[in-house]
Image (spheres, helix red, strand yellow):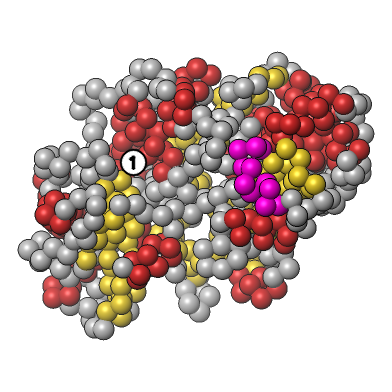
Amino acid sequence: MRNWVVHEVLQDAAWQHPNVEVVSPSKRFTYAQSWERVIRLANSLRNLGIGKGTVVGVLDVNSYRYFELQHALSIAGAVVHTINFRLPLDDLVYTVDHAGDEIVFAWEGFEQAGRALQSHVRKVIWMLDSYEDLIESGSAVLHEHGTGPTDTFSIFYTTGTTGRPKGIRYRHQDMLLASLQIAHHLAIHDTGAKLQTHDTIMPLIPFFHIHGWGTPFFAPYLGAKLVLPETADASAQLELIRNEGVTWSNMVPTQLHMLLQALSEHPSSGGDSSGASTSEPTLEPTSEPTSDRPAAEGTNPAEAAAATEDTSGVANPQPQLPLHVLTGGSPLPSGIAQRATNVGIQFSLIYGGSDQLATSISAIQTSTGTKQTDRLHTLSTRTLPLPMVRVDVRDVHERSVPRDGQTIGEVWVQSPWLPDGYVRDETRSREVFIDGWFKTGDLAVWHKDGSLHVLDRQKDAVKSGGEWIATSVIEAIISELDEVAMVAVLAEQSEQWGERPMAVIQLDKADDSSTDVGAESGADVGADVGAGSSAGSGVDVETERATPDSPTRAFANESGSTDSRSVFDRRIRNHLYAAVEQGRLAKFWVPDRILFVDSIPVTSAGKIHKSALRKTLEEK
């Protein structure tokens, strides 16, 4: 690479790996063919008046078109705005106006959004109508435009759950460094999402979200085959995995849950590929943390989120799916982690975000002598900073907390690709971008080996009697039950303790409620979170908490009666108190209330949308 700009990774792949394929359900090209198409497209873009600094929006699913546009716009020196099609239309239009988009490339599946943008930009180019014509009419001679590593390559926006979405710009060198460091981290460490040149990669993280976590850049960099699912649902994704020999993918935990469901429904066939759609695509979903060992009393707050049942030696009739998965965006629930392991999926957890890019990924540090029985626990909870990333965990006085695996603090991040603030938002920038560090708003504990266990968003954690309660820990334990499709633990105001945890649960619609999954489920999933102790807070955990014999406060609606939900309430409480007895959960962390709902909202990034859920419950 001569100039350290994005399109050079595809240029290099066309030279070093010319016959490796880029595959969509409707198209199949080699890297050499893709590079020629990208050159032709870049020259046609110039004829449209797109040049250095022009902001161009892309409204599309993960397709060969989107892959090619990112590299063609790099050649043109333009700025790619990866439009988040999951935002409410009003917010989507706001991001286009705020970013200063001049032209938008829109796939016809997003016709409503595309038409809404026509009065806000110079031109909307409809992909199915014009895209191939632009390639055919363009010259095959490469004309570069003096783009350098410090020029802006892309702009994208945070989800905006507490206000308008915030824009972040990244330079060519930022995006390349962060993306390639993901590949390097996964290559050099012992980790579930091991990544190598012979892998076949299928990104399920949408390109609008941090460019699909860098896959359009590190796939050609590695010379790996790239499969782009477009509008495939979970069953069609499973068929692509089988037909194209996919060995590596990225996805949020909800997507992993959906893929596991598809595997159970189609254990040997590829499923019904009719899941592809020309309307609103289903690219994405959400979930939480996990592990694989029982914990002794007094273990750290992080480990309760994750230990997982040891099924070694148990016959497993389940279909197998040998796939390496990089997952993140929200904690990974213990139940999902164990089910994935049971079918042969190996995974790693990534931590980062739109306003910091990749920060850390879980891996096994052989120097620590990690046992095989601890592997699942480590990979599902504890992440190691990427090369060139510095992490600090600080208390409210901005002092580093001890690396004891118990003291909770806020995560601060520093890296070569960290932006200096949000686009045209000095107020919010000053609040979180401080002296070269990014104040994440995430709560975590730090371990002696430098690994990090992120427990919760600070705004989502519960503070009861002066003590933090990490909601992800409770969510992980509840998620171990097969009946639970999704769970969110929220703070509820308490006159006595300030706040108390409340669990909101979406049950699996396919659940057979006759199966007893009470205290004798015995899943060794997690560890102690200050087991049975309020750490001097003065909280009387014996009197404040609800008990297994407390009256059920279920929430009846069309999908189930109060009586049936009372049964689930009792099972969930039995399971939580089994975790208390096993030393995996403090007594005062058991939720006072359990509510059942038909569905739990998720954000555009596939995370549980807790603020929207709170609002819905307040209205009820």
Q: Main secondary structure of the magenta part?
A: helix
Residue 115 is inside the magenta segment: yes
Q: What is the secondary structure assignment of the residue under circle 1? A: helix
Residue 43 is inside the magenta segment: no
Residue occupied by mark 1: 336
**Image quadrant containing the C terminus:** bottom left
Vertical comparison of 359 with 464: above or below: above
Name the residue located 17 percent from the left edge and 70 percent from the top edge.
545
Estimate how packed mark 1 is, as few (under 14), some (14 to 19) or many (20 or more) residues with alpha carbons within 10 Å: many
**Image quadrant containing the N terminus:** top right
Residue 603: give x, y in percent of width and height.
Answer: 48, 54
Q: Quadrant of residue 371?
A: top left
Start-end of magenta stretch: 107-117
Q: Quadrant of residue 166?
A: bottom right
The answer to whether residue 437 is seen in the rendering is yes
Q: Is residue 508 left or right of residue 448?
A: left
Name the residue located 15 percent from the left edge and 68 percent from the top edge.
546
Please, what is the three-letter code of the amino acid marked with disc 1? Ile
Q: Is residue 121 left or right of residue 613?
A: right
Foreground pick, 283 / 292: 283
The answer to whether residue 307 is seen in the rendering is no
Residue 188: give x, y in percent of width and height.
Answer: 56, 36
Vertical comparison of 260 with 241: above or below: below
Q: Is residue 239 left or right of residue 29?
A: left
Name the residue located 58 percent from the left edge and 23 percent from the top edge.
25
Foreground pick, 47 / 399: 47
